[in-house]
Image (spheres, rainbow, N blue to C red):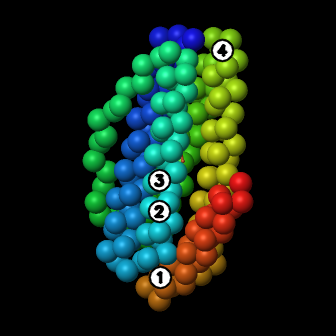
Amino acid sequence: MVSENLTSALNKQIEMEGYASFLYLSMSCWCEHKGLKGCAAFLRRQSEEENMHMLKIIDYMLDVDAIPVIPQVNQPPVRFDSIVSLMHSVYEHEKKVTRSIHQLVDLCTKEDNSDTFNFLQWYVIEQREEEALMRSILDKIKLIGDGPQSLYYIDKEVETINAQQVAKATTN
Ligand code: FEO
């Protein structure tokens, strides 16, 4: 059982995860168009993960007899200034999602809803890992440098990181 307040907050989170999925898919398309295949694969996988995050909340809401609202998804940007600013935007977006998850957790505490609180702990860990992942990519970009000659190496690094993430997901 979840309150009206919490139902509305969970629906907002569905919208946020859905938007993240579309945003990363759009970013993936831009990378593919620019020949950055490693970055494109990484962002396509991130997009699929966000979709899974959205579905997980929908399933939870159905389990507790709440009605999930499937949102209208705002169109994400189509063009990006550079791969460096794009990766910075992903990091900023993840920080925004983390803040939203923590607000949801706070609401559960206020409403004494331990079931939803426990459900959200998976997202708390996931957000910590996603922020750390994006920081590691930005650190690599800093080491490589962001001049035009660096694009090939940035793409290769992101491809390697993506392969590590895929391997991690299959062992879990
Ligand atoms: Fe599901 Fe990366 O926020």
Q: Distance between the residues labelled 2 and 4?
A: 34 Å
Q: Distance between the residues labelled 3 and 4?
A: 29 Å
Badge nearest the viewer, 1 or 2: 2
Dot 4 lies on which element?
A: loop
Mark 2 sits on what residue? Answer: 43
Q: Give the numbered dot on residue 113.
A: 4
Which residue is the extreme one toward the bottom? 149
> Which amino acid type corresponds to the residue marked 2 in the rendered image?
Leu
Residue under the image location 48 percent in, 30 percent down? 58
Badge nearest the viewer, 3 or 1: 3
Mark 3 sits on what residue? Answer: 48
Dot 3 lies on which element?
A: helix
Q: Residues within 10 Å of mark 3 (few under 14, many from 20)?
A: some
Considering only order in the chain, which callout, 4 or 3, is on the residue closer to the N terminus? 3
Considering only order in the chain, which callout, 2 or 1, is on the residue closer to the N terminus? 2
Considering only order in the chain, which callout, 2 or 3, is on the residue closer to the N terminus? 2
Q: Position of residue 154 (x, y in %)?
A: 53, 78
